Amino acid sequence: MSNDIRVWGYLREYAQEKEDIMRAVESVFQSGMLILGENVKAFEQEYASYCGVNYGIGCDNGTNAITLALHAVGIKPGDEVITVSNTAIPTVSAIISAGAKPVFVDIDSATYLMDESKVESAITPRTRAIIPVHLFGQCVNMNAINDIASRHKLFVIEDCAQAHGATYKGEKAGAMSHISATSFYPTKVLGAYGDGGMMLTNNSEIDAKLRRLRFYGAEQTYYAIEHGYNSRLDEVQAAILRTKLQRIEQYIERRREIAQMYNTLLADTSLTLPAETGNGRHVYYLYVVRHPNRDKILTQLREKGIFLNISYPTPIHLMEAYKHLGGSVNSLPNTENAAREIFSLPMFPSLTDDEVMRVASALKEVL
Ligand SMILES: Cc1ncc(COP(=O)(O)O)c(C=O)c1O
């Protein structure tokens, strides 16, 4: 076995949980129902209840969860949706797939989250929605966002892909907007063994609409009420996610423990360590640090068998695909400065204490 340490891996967790996972898979194969069966239904209820929301609608991935959420609130071509450029590409591609135009606001330079004080000046007569992204594992200041949204009659769609189980003033990520969207991509805090996603809402009409949108616009087979998509969560992933949901608090506890170890071991270095907002529980989907010599540090650690990651090296407004949106260099200074300096340390529940210590001492050596 190689001694390399990577930012993420699932094989150790699979070895630990194999019995439960294979039992879940086998039960689906034996059930006679491979699509939209009992597991999807149960997981929708269980995950919605974990988040404190009335309805959960499983879907195929987090990107489509955002697109369908935008369709469900009636976003149309020409509408504008405010979000951040410091996020995963899918937040933005989902807005474009829904026909709308993403409008970017800058982030807070300490937490890397949407700076709520920048939102109001980005609102135009065409603005219809705000997508705050609970990035790296902690929540955006939702009271401020919801206050702005209600004054300007905008929809809010939380992007919770990186924040399963994170809280804000006692509420779970995903419970603080008209619709929230999440991903169960394997690396996530609650990760599937393949793709998966979910939308959450407290509104029964939106729930019914999202169920149609993910299923060809139909409520029953062979009859569409409106134009829809095929965006279903499949039974195998739902069954696996049900078993993993039972362990989510353990996963989060271990992530927070690892973060605490890094905080202690790296306290006296020139790295800028993650800043918690103080508004709730950070679940440390990623442990993101910052240093002006980032690229050199990454190269030197790679030579020691430690592979770090950058989330994200290029802000979306500067990517080739999104230049037509009119983004320019220096338009979002906090976002662009962070992209030059941030990087993530290995973080997943089955990372051992020894590995955390190896990462920390290797970092100290090269610093
Ligand atoms: C912030 C954010 N939004 C959306 C997504 C999209 O999720 P998926 O990869 O399941 O489409 C991801 C994950 O990749 C993400 O990190």
Image: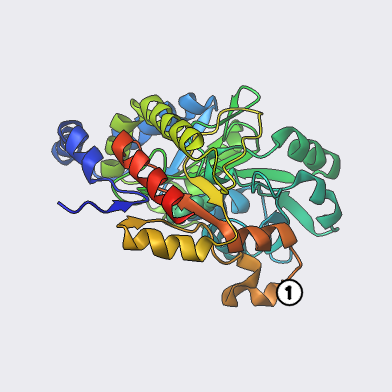
Between 182 and 250, the one nearer to me in the picture: 250
**Image position, residue 95 (x, y; %):** 61, 60
Which residue bears the numbered disc 1?
Answer: 326
The answer to whether residue 6 is left or right of residue 34 is right
Q: Residues within 10 Å of mark 1 (few under 14, many from 20)?
A: few
Question: Which amino acid type corresponds to the residue marked 1 in the rendered image?
Answer: Gly
Q: Would you identify the image quadrant in which residue 249 lies?
A: top left
**Image position, residue 52 (x, y; %):** 54, 24
Between 83 and 48, the one nearer to me in the picture: 83
Q: Would you identify the image quadrant in which residue 54 lies?
A: top right
**Image position, residue 207 (x, y; %):** 54, 38
Helix, strand, or loop for circle 1?
A: loop
**Image position, residue 342 (x, y; %):** 56, 56
Tell me the residue at 69%/48% (across/down): 114
Task: Tell me if I can see residue 297 in this picture.
Answer: yes
Tell me the residue at 73%/74% (across/down): 326
Between 354 and 129, the one nearer to me in the picture: 354
Compared with 72, 23 (above or below) is: above
